Image (cartoon, grey):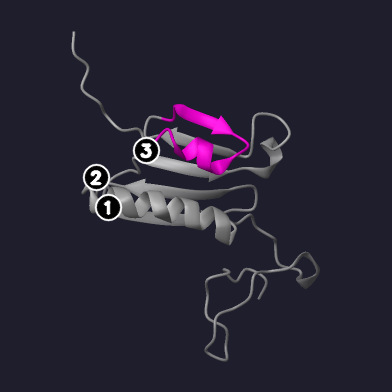
């Protein structure tokens, strides 16, 4: 069985390991612990503010995607993507809006996430 998902339970009842290239399973891209800490700190602040309610994480063979939802039945408001193929070009990280518009792209995840954490301020004329 070479088509087992990484999140599937192993026969012993524990979680299966991340597939290695030598195991015959296809490797996939994932977020590191540091990257997930940055994403979840922003996500927690937005949930506390009542703007976001749900998320999903997809680990694909060419990129990792963290999707943010207002409600779980809708399309994602934003997608935070990690694409290592673009590391030397525009940067591996990008924030994509619901319409497919790339809001920000760069090499540093914390700088890219600032596009979602902008504070509104009152402008007097």
Q: Which residues are magenta?
A: 100-116
* 72, 5: nearer the viewer: 72
Q: Could you say whether the residue bearing mark 1 is in a helix, strand or loop?
A: helix
Q: Which of pointers 2 and 3 lies earlier in the amino acid sequence?
A: 2
**Circles 2, 1 touching at the beta carbon (< 8 Å):** yes
Residue 27 seen: yes
Residue 24: x and y, percent? 76, 69
Neighbour tally class for label 3: few under 14, some 14-19, many 20 plus, Cα within 10 Å: few
How far apart are the two marked residues, 2 and 1, measured between alpha carbons? 6 Å
Task: Tell me which corner region of the image, top left, top right, bottom left or bottom right, holds residue 78.
Answer: top left
- Name the quarter where the C terminus is drawn: top left
Report if residue 106 lies within the magenta region: yes
Q: Which of pointers 3 and 1 lies earlier in the amino acid sequence?
A: 1
Q: Which residue is mark 3?
A: 117
Q: Could you say whether the residue bearing mark 3 is in a helix, strand or loop?
A: loop
Reply above or below: 15 against 43: below
**Circles 2, 3 touching at the beta carbon (< 8 Å):** no
Q: Return the residue found at the far right.
A: 22
* 105, 18: nearer the viewer: 105
* 124, 22: nearer the viewer: 124
Horizontally, residue 71 falls left or right of residue 90, namely: left
Task: Tell me which corner region of the image, top left, top right, bottom left or bottom right, holds residue 55.
Answer: bottom left
How far apart are the two marked residues, 3 and 1, measured between alpha carbons? 12 Å
Q: Which residue is mark 2?
A: 51
Q: Residue at x 77, y 64 (%)?
A: 21
**Circles 3, 1 touching at the beta carbon (< 8 Å):** no
Reply above or below: 61 against 77: below
Residue 106: x and y, percent? 59, 33
Neighbour tally class for label 1: few under 14, some 14-19, many 20 plus, Cα within 10 Å: some
Residue 107: x and y, percent? 63, 37
How far apart are the two marked residues, 2 and 3, measured between alpha carbons? 11 Å
């Amino acid at each position: 069985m070479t088509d087992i998902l990484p999140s599937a339970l192993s026969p012993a009842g524990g979680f299966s390991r991340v597939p290695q290239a030598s195991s015959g399973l296809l490797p996939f891209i994932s977020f590191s612990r540091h990257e997930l800490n940055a994403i979840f700190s922003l996500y927690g602040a937005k949930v506390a503010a009542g703007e976001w309610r749900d998320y999903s994480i997809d680990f694909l063979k060419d990129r990792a995607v963290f999707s943010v939802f207002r409600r779980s039945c809708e399309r994602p408001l934003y997608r935070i993507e990690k694409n290592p193929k673009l590391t030397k070009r525009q940067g591996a990280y990008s924030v994509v809006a619901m319409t497919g518009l790339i809001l920000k792209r760069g090499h540093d995840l914390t700088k890219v996430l600032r596009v979602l954490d902008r504070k509104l301020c009152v402008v007097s004329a």
